[in-house]
Image (spheres, rainbow, N blue to C red):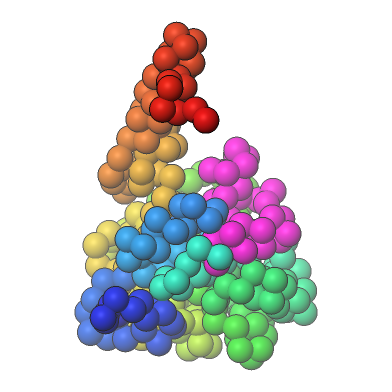
């Protein structure tokens, strides 16, 4: 992907796949609103994921399960309005695709039609094969998601590393090949051993994007609010914090409060 004579070229599924084939790493972050999406896009992010992690970081829920299709579409619309270059991928929320492939297709069509996003992401492998195929047949690009799939948190019972045992690792290998074979354009690998992520990344043609899956995936993704330190208490080993915005915004807010209370704000030049 290049920026030529000041003009940004749009990142597409083809661009993402070409990046894998020439060994260029893919950078993905989450975005849920216009202002943040604009900053991340202008900084040159390749993919913006309107993640259902919005349920946690934007709405304060404990899990990703409560967020609705309407709410995901609202977030996606805000992100799409801000973006000139990045590819926008939208998580299909819990309940919008698991029951059957017709409901899945209707949900994916709503996301694409009402938000203007470029692709959808779905958690799971063989369990959701029919739904993924049907969505792909409608011309909608699908990003898969294997490993720790937070929509299944009540099945797992914990957010710990997945696929450490042979049987689960083998299922993940097979699911990764399946997603590649049926035509997903990329897949997220979340919180699995680095060695397994490396093996899977080398065994599939499509790009793998890791979170807590080591350095050998074709790209990396983080939740932006974690990466810039807006979330405070979430400190998994895989997270690198580039800022401590919780602290900085808190300090700025204290200074603002002080200035208002002391009548320092607004001053002569800050009024009409
Ligand atoms: O919802 C989300 O933010 C995600 C990423 C963690 C991959 O699915």
Query: In this picture, is 175 found above or below 159?
Result: below
Quadrant occupied by the N terminus: bottom left
Q: Quadrant of residue 112?
A: bottom right
In the image, 237 versus 85, the foreground residue is 85
Residue 257's x, y, as percent? 47, 17
Q: Residue at x 49, y 28 (%)?
A: 271
Say if 15 sits above or below 61 in the image.
below
**Quarter of the image holding residue 127?**
bottom right
Confirm whether the magenta stretch covers residue 69.
Answer: yes
Residue drawn at the location 29% of the way across and 76% of the way down: 6
Question: Where's residue 30, x and y in %?
Answer: 46, 57
At x 61% / y 80%, what residue is drawn? 132
Q: Please tell me whether residue 265 belongs to the stretch shown in magenta.
A: no
The residue at 41%/73% (across/down) is 85
Choose between 71 and 176: the one closer to the eye.
Answer: 71
**Vertical placement of residue 256 versus 202, above or below:** above
| Quarter where residue 211 is shown | bottom left
Where does residue 244 sit, x and y in percent of width and height?
33, 35
Horizontal side of residue 126 vs 108, given as left or right: left
Percent from the top left, x then y, of residue 188? Answer: 43, 67
The answer to whether residue 15 is left or right of residue 145 is: left
Residue 89 visible within the image: yes
Extent of the magenta region: 51-80
């Amino acid at each position: 992907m290049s920026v030529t004579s000041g003009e940004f070229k749009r990142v597409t599924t083809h661009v993402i796949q070409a990046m894998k084939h020439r060994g260029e790493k893919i950078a993905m972050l989450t975005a849920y609103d216009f202002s943040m999406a604009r900053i991340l896009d202008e900084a040159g992010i390749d993919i913006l994921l309107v993640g259902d992690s919005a349920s946690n970081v934007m709405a304060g829920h404990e899990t990703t399960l409560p967020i609705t299709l309407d709410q995901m579409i609202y977030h996606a619309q805000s992100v799409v309005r801000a973006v000139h270059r990045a590819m926008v991928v939208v998580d299909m929320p819990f309940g919008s695709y698991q029951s059957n492939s017709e409901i899945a297709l209707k949900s994916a069509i709503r996301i694409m039609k009402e938000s203007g996003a470029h692709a959808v992401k779905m958690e799971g492998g063989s369990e959701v094969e029919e739904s993924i195929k049907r969505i792909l047949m409608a011309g909608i690009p699908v990003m898969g998601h294997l490993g720790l799939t937070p929509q299944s948190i009540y099945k797992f019972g914990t957010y710990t590393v997945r696929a450490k045992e042979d049987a689960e690792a083998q299922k993940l290998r097979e699911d990764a090949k399946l997603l590649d074979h049926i035509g997903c354009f990329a897949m997220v690998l979340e919180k699995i051993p680095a060695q397994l992520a490396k093996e899977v990344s080398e065994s599939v043609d499509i790009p793998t994007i890791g979170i807590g899956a080591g350095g050998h995936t074709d790209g990396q993704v983080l939740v932006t609010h974690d990466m810039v330190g807006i979330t405070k208490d979430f400190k998994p080993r895989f997270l690198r914090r580039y800022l401590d915005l919780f602290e900085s915004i808190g300090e700025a807010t204290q200074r603002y409060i002080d200035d208002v209370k002391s009548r320092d704000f607004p001053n002569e030049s800050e009024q009409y």
